[in-house]
Structure formats: structure tokens, C-alpha cells
Image: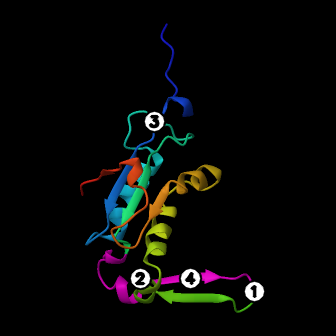
Amino acid sequence: MKDTFVNSQKLTTKKWYVIDAEDQILGRLATQASTVLMGKNKNTYTPFLENGDYVIIINAEKIKTTGKKDKQKLYRNHSGYPGGMRIEKFSSLIERRPEKIIEQAIKGMLPKGPLGRTIYKNLKVYKGTEHPHTAQSPELIMN
């Protein structure tokens, strides 16, 4: 009788990938990155293990959206105090912190709980083309 193979953390090897966000749609980029982060692109995918890869996203300030989202999309943050709601438009946030837009889109697609928080740590988003992870020799994901 054959036993069923169950993947473990020790058997997985992590790779580094670079995604260029220039002229890409925000949601499509986020789904591609979250798939690689969770390890769903591997044939050894296990939902309860962190067996995904590292993802580096460059050119975060050149991300695109469809429709009128660049003028209408709002990012809300509440401090927890009465009257503590802070609202910022997409157009102003992309000038101030474009990394936050991509990070928030990808974080919403990851699993909730402790597993999602550990997977999220494997995401690196940078403004511009330079990143400090050249020693890991990341592969470029073609879109």
C-alpha cells in the first residue's frame, strides 16, 4: 500500500523572483504576486504550510489602474479614537508612498491569521528599479 505524500517545511527550497510593476494593472499584479508568495504555482502546494517563494516588486510608482480608480479609489485608516478616520485618495498616495498601495492589495489576497502574516514577510516592494537583494540572484517573472 502506498502512503500519501505530505509536504513539509524542510523539503521546500525558496527562490527569489522579481516583478516589474511598470505599466501593469494593480489587481493583476497582486494576484500574480500572491500566487507565488503562497506557493500555488508549485506542484507541492500545501495550504497549511508556508512553502511559497520570495517576491521583489520594483517600479511601484508606475503601477496602473483601470477605469476612474486613480481619481476615485480611497484608502481608509482609523486610529481607533472618535473622529480618527483618515482618508487618502489613490492619486495622492501614489505620490507619497506607492509601495503601500501594492502591499495593501497583496496583503488582502493572502490568508488571514498567523500563516498569512508570515507569508507577507516574504514580500519586498521598492520604488524605482534598485533593490538590495541582488545577492540572492532573483529571477525575473515575465508578464
Of residue 18 and residue 84, the one placed in the foreground of this image is: 18
Vertical placement of residue 113 versus 74, above or below: above
Specify which label sits upstream in the sequence, 3 or 4. Answer: 3
Labels 4, 2: front one:
2
Tell me which corner region of the image, top left, top right, bottom left or bottom right, holds residue 73.
bottom left
Q: Amino acid at mark 3?
A: Thr
Point 36% across, 51% down: residue = 17
Q: Quick one: SS at disc 2?
A: helix
Tell me which corner region of the image, top left, top right, bottom left or bottom right, holds residue 91.
bottom left
Point 33% across, 63% down: residue = 28
Specify which label sits upstream in the sequence, 4 or 2. Answer: 4
State the mark number for residue 94.
Answer: 2
State the mark number for residue 124.
Answer: none
- Name the residue that disc number 4 marks: 76
- Name the residue that disc number 1 marks: 81
Tell me which corner region of the image, top left, top right, bottom left or bottom right, holds residue 23.
bottom left
User: Distance from label 3 to label 2 (Cα)?
Assistant: 34 Å
What residue range appears in magenta?
Answer: 61-81
Labels 3, 4: front one:
3
Tell me the quadrant of the picture where the C terminus can be found. bottom left
Asked whether the residues under the numbered discs 4 and 2 touch, taking CB atoms below 8 Å apart as contact, a structural biologist would say: no
Q: Badge 3: how crowded within 10 Å, few (<14), some, or many (20+)?
A: few
Asked whether the residues under the numbered discs 3 and 1 touch, taking CB atoms below 8 Å apart as contact, a structural biologist would say: no
Of residue 125 and residue 106, the one placed in the foreground of this image is: 125
User: Distance from label 1 to label 4 (Cα)?
Assistant: 14 Å
- Name the residue that disc number 3 marks: 13
Labels 1, 2: front one:
2
User: Distance from label 1 to label 2 (Cα)?
Assistant: 26 Å
